[in-house]
Image (cartoon, helix red, strand yellow):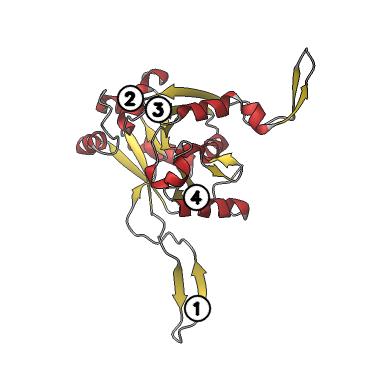
Amino acid sequence: MKVVILCGGRGTRLREETEFRPKPMVPIGQKPILWHIMKYYASFGHREFILCLGYKGDMIKDYFRNYLWNTCDVSLSLGRAQKVKFHGRHSEEDWTVTLAETGEDAMTAFRLKQVQRYISKGETFLFTYGDGLSNIDIGATIQAHRRSKKICTISAVHPAGRFGALKIEGDGSIHDFVEKPQVEQAYVNGGYMVCDYKIFNYLTDDPSVMFEREPVAKVVADGQLHSYRHEGFWQPMDTYQETQYLNRLWADNKAPWKIW
């Protein structure tokens, strides 16, 4: 299936990073968070990507235009007949990436509507945000969507707790500390959605409309929204602290999303 990823927002809550680059290009380890999301989908066999670009989209274009330069060792011949030799290979050679301009300040519904031309009529596709990581079972979300026979299936996740959780014994001693437990009981939309082509019937050409508001409300009213409940890891990257947390998980080889 094709994977549509929203990459155009300004990420104002992460201004420490997004003043200089688009949010999906903020690095986790040595690679942009967007790369991690794409690698995760590719691990389930989905390697055709449509990126909805907006704010500082040229940086995302440059990254993929120069992908070999960004991922391989290089030998250069500096004579008049210049030669470039890239050493080694990478596992992304079977990826297809469509870089679609969807407006500098457009909201999410408009961005999705703008890439309708890259989705075949009647085709089911995957849809997510360019700023969140999870170990959700993509195959299971697709199966749940097919069984439901509805237009859109969202991944329902528990938001991570904002504070560390302490396990305190009766005498006041502490025997366990979890830095960011996923303890919230409520569910939120974690992205990692599955959509039928009919979802475009709920979208307009109004750039001010957010997908999560009027369109989803209409889908709900028509009884066409389904959910796949995910009880495992899910972490957005909305703040500098969350960026640091994801980088620590990666550096400590404890990243739940690294399944490749």
Q: Do the numbered discs 3 and 2 sit on residues whose CB atoms are within 8 Å?
A: no
Q: Which residue is mark 1?
A: 174
Which mark lies nearer to you, 3 or 1?
Answer: 1
Badge 3: few (under 14), some or many (20 or more) residues near its Cα, within 10 Å? Answer: many
Q: Do the numbered discs 4 and 2 sit on residues whose CB atoms are within 8 Å?
A: no
Q: Which residue is mark 4?
A: 243
Relative to 211, 239 lies left or right: right
Which mark lies nearer to you, 4 or 2?
Answer: 4
Residue 237 shows up from this direction: yes
Residue 207 x, y percent position in the rendering = 28, 27
Name the residue: 42% across, 29% down: 125
Three-letter amino acid code at the position of disc 2: Lys
- Residue 87, quarter of picture: top right
* First in residue order: circle 1 vs circle 2: 2
Q: Which residue is mark 2?
A: 113
Q: Do the numbered discs 1 and 4 sit on residues whose CB atoms are within 8 Å?
A: no
Residue 21 x, y percent position in the rendering = 48, 36
Three-letter amino acid code at the position of disc 1: Ile
For label 2, the SS is helix
Q: Which residue is mark 3?
A: 124
Badge 4: few (under 14), some or many (20 or more) residues near its Cα, within 10 Å? Answer: many
Residue 76 x, y percent position in the rendering = 76, 23
Name the residue: 41% across, 23% down: 101
